[in-house]
Image: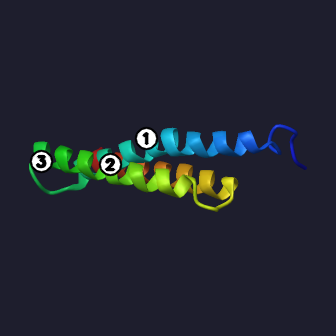
């Protein structure tokens, strides 16, 4: 079953744009938190390294959001990976 709004081309572009911006931000912040908690270096350097790698993660997600992958698979991987990384960061930081 397809919804009327999901069949429009504008919905596809909007969904991919939101995945690139909001999903990229979510994954980038999760990567930054995980690296800040997991790296065995002084806290300030770990936070700096996490922030630097978060830019890489955001760029990768932005490129991947506009690849010819189905939107359901893209959103599923994006949200699942963000949740897994945040769970790992929470386990290490707690």
Q: Mark 2 sits on what residue?
A: 54
Q: Quadrant of residue 72?
A: bottom right
- Image coordinates of residue 84 in percent, x first then y, are 46, 54
- Secondary structure at badge 1 equals helix
Nearest the camera: 89 or 68? 68
| Label 1 environment density (alpha carbons within 10 Å; few <14, some 14–19, many ≥20) | many
Chain-order first, disc 3 or disc 1: 1
Label 3 crowding class (10 Å Cα cut-off): few <14, some 14-19, many 20+? Answer: few
C-alpha distance separating marks 3 and 1: 21 Å
Which residue does the numbered mark 3 point to in the structure image?
A: 45
Q: Is residue 74 left or right of residue 91?
A: right
Residue under the image location 64 percent in, 62 percent down: 68
The picture places residue 2, in percent across and down from the top left corner, at 87, 47
Whole-percent x, y for residue 49 in the image: 20, 51
- Secondary structure at badge 3 equals helix
Question: Which residue occupies 12% across, 42% down?
Answer: 44
Q: Which residue is mark 1?
A: 25
Judged from the image, the secondary structure of the residue bearing numbered disc 2 is helix
Q: Position of residue 34 (x, y in %)?
A: 31, 50
């Amino acid at each position: 079953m397809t919804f009327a709004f999901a069949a429009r081309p504008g919905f596809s572009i909007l969904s991919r744009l939101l995945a690139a911006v909001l999903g990229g931000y979510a994954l980038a912040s999760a990567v930054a938190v995980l690296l800040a908690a997991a790296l065995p270096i002084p806290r300030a350097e770990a936070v700096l390294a996490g922030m630097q790698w978060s830019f890489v993660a955001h760029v990768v997600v932005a490129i991947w959001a506009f690849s010819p992958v189905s939107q359901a698979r893209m959103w599923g991987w994006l949200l699942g990976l963000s949740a897994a990384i945040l769970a790992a960061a929470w386990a290490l930081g707690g």
